[in-house]
């Protein structure tokens, strides 16, 4: 029997970074059982319970190792989440190296695949004769920005948000400088320097796997493949998402069972997004004003849009709603604190729309269930995702923000009615249905499955070469 082809993966800290790269690994070993994967997990502080519970469900040919956690006191207080993630990886590099050294002493390591924030670990691949890969958990459009970033940094002076003309990335819809990711909005900041360093570091890998699929972003993917002087091989292997559990239906699913088909707007800002108190009030009043049915996953407000991203907040969020809101809307909607089984919610026949923070995992889940969107980007690359959904794919509406950065209740009610009842919403629903079919085909035996098979063959061939040298 052929020896297993061994690869190591390094996610970055946080449950939402762990899941995409591990879900890819599960798909790899499901389709190619001769692979063995070791997941090397850095963490800021002790690993979250969600991560510990998740890795216990992994198949036997995926091992996991939690690295010694990085002490939060070592990192700058109040820094942007991306900076904290990046520094956690930097401080974890000696531990990552130690694990890779131990693994490669027992059997050849064919490939090292890392999350975007863990790009520095790719330096170890050459030392252990492994191929090096980035697992890019976002859109091809965002990868296109990373590939162009060194050039943009040289060619453009001043802040991107002040540009009069839109930025045209190859194969992508044009976007305003203000819609570039949050780390690029202050070019003198440490956050921007790290972003640029990450963009340059990624381009040194042997290949980049994208959690997207050809039919969703064909022109952006083709442009990446054809880019001048670009020696990076791009592998679109998505949509890869975490499947919902089959546990007993909870309160919100029972509530959905009693609603008419396609009548409910699901409202959730992902695992880390938070709104201010003022914006929470406006959203509540907008939901009420719309007259539309809604299911709202509510988190306690904060003036930091990513407050819940690396921290756990224990306050009861329901106490922050406007007075009388729950009583007035008890026949119209349901508010659930902190969490809902999102995949089951989106797949429910009663759900007809999703008001979403535009995190890529949530977008892909919505695509796979054929649910059109209202985009409400908060941080990271979410504004870019919103542009692609609204201007490119035309499967979403984006509410307007006032001069104080608030989406007002009247605007919220207007876009809700447009999506749930209007002609424009019907067209979006139809386009999203087609995208759903394309996503299913890509994973069944279409573009993404074929790409995965090509990649697995390359790894097996290289693994065989290493095995001969090793023995």
Image (cartoon, rainbow, N blue to C red):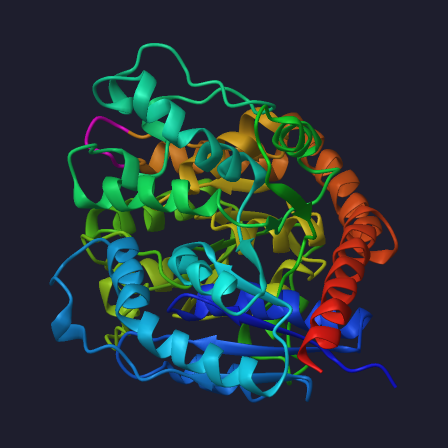
Q: Is residue 171 above or below residue 383?
A: above
Q: Position of residue 316 (x, y in %)?
A: 27, 74
Q: How many marks?
A: 0
Mark yes or no: residue 455 visible.
yes
Farthest-out residue, top: 164
Q: Position of residue 145 (x, y in %)?
A: 46, 33
Q: Position of residue 253 (x, y in %)?
A: 61, 71
Q: Nearer the viewer, residue 73 or 217?
A: 73
Q: Specify whether 77 is left or right of 418.
A: left
Magenta highlight: main SS? loop
Q: Specify whether 147 is left or right of 424.
A: left
* 197 within the magenta span: no
Q: Nearer the viewer, residue 302 or 204?
A: 204
Residue lying at 84% horizontally and 50% vertically, measured from the top left: 441
Q: Quadrant of the N terminus?
A: bottom right
Mark yes or no: residue 400 visible.
no
> Which residues fall within the magenta stretch?
402-406
């Amino acid at each position: 029997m052929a020896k297993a082809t061994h690869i190591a993966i390094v996610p970055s800290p946080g449950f939402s970074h762990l899941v995409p790269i591990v879900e890819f690994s599960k798909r790899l070993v499901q389709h190619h059982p001769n692979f063995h994967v070791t997941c090397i997990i850095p963490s800021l502080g002790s690993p979250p319970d969600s991560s510990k519970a998740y890795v216990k469900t992994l198949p036997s040919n995926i091992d996991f190792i939690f690295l010694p956690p990085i002490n939060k006191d070592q990192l700058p207080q109040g820094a942007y989440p991306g900076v904290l993630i990046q520094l956690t990886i930097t401080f974890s590099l000696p531990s990552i190296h130690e694990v890779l050294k131990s693994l490669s002493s027992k059997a050849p390591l064919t490939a090292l695949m890392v999350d975007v924030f863990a790009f520095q670990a790719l330096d170890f691949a050459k030392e252990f004769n492994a191929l090096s890969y980035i697992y890019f958990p976002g859109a091809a459009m965002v990868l296109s920005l990373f590939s162009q970033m060194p050039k943009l940094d040289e060619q453009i002076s001043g802040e991107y948000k002040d540009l009069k003309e839109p930025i045209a990335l190859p194969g992508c819809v044009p976007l305003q400088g203000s819609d570039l990711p949050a780390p690029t909005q202050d070019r003198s900041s440490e956050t921007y320097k790290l972003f640029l360093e990450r963009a340059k570091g990624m381009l040194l890998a042997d290949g980049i796997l994208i959690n997207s699929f050809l039919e969703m972003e064909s022109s952006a993917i083709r442009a990446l493949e054809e880019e001048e002087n670009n020696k990076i091989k791009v592998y679109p292997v998505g949509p890869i998402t975490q499947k919902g559990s089959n546990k007993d239906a909870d309160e919100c699913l029972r509530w959905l069972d009693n609603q008419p088909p396609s009548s409910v707007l699901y409202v959730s800002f992902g695992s880390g997004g938070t709104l201010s108190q003022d914006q929470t009030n406006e959203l509540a009043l907008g939901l009420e004003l719309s007259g539309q049915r809604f299911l709202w996953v509510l988190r306690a407000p904060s003036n930091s849009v990513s407050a819940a991203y690396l921290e756990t907040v224990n306050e009861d969020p329901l106490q922050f709603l406007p007075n009388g809101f729950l009583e007035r809307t008890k026949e119209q909607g349901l508010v659930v604190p902190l969490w809902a089984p999102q995949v089951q919610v989106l797949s429910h026949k009663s759900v007809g729309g999703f008001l979403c923070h535009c995190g890529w995992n949530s977008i892909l889940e919505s695509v796979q269930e054929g649910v059109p969107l209202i985009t409400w980007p908060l941080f990271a690359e979410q504004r870019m995702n919103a542009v692609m959904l609204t201007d490119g794919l035309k499967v979403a509406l984006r509410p307007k923000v006032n001069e104080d950065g608030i989406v007002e209740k009247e605007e919220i009610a207007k876009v809700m009615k447009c999506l749930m009842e209007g002609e424009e919403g019907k067209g979006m629903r139809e386009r999203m249905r087609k995208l759903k079919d394309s996503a299913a085909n890509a994973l069944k035996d279409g573009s993404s499955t074929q790409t995965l098979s090509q990649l697995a063959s390359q790894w097996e061939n290289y693994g065989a070469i290493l095995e001969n040298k090793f023995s």
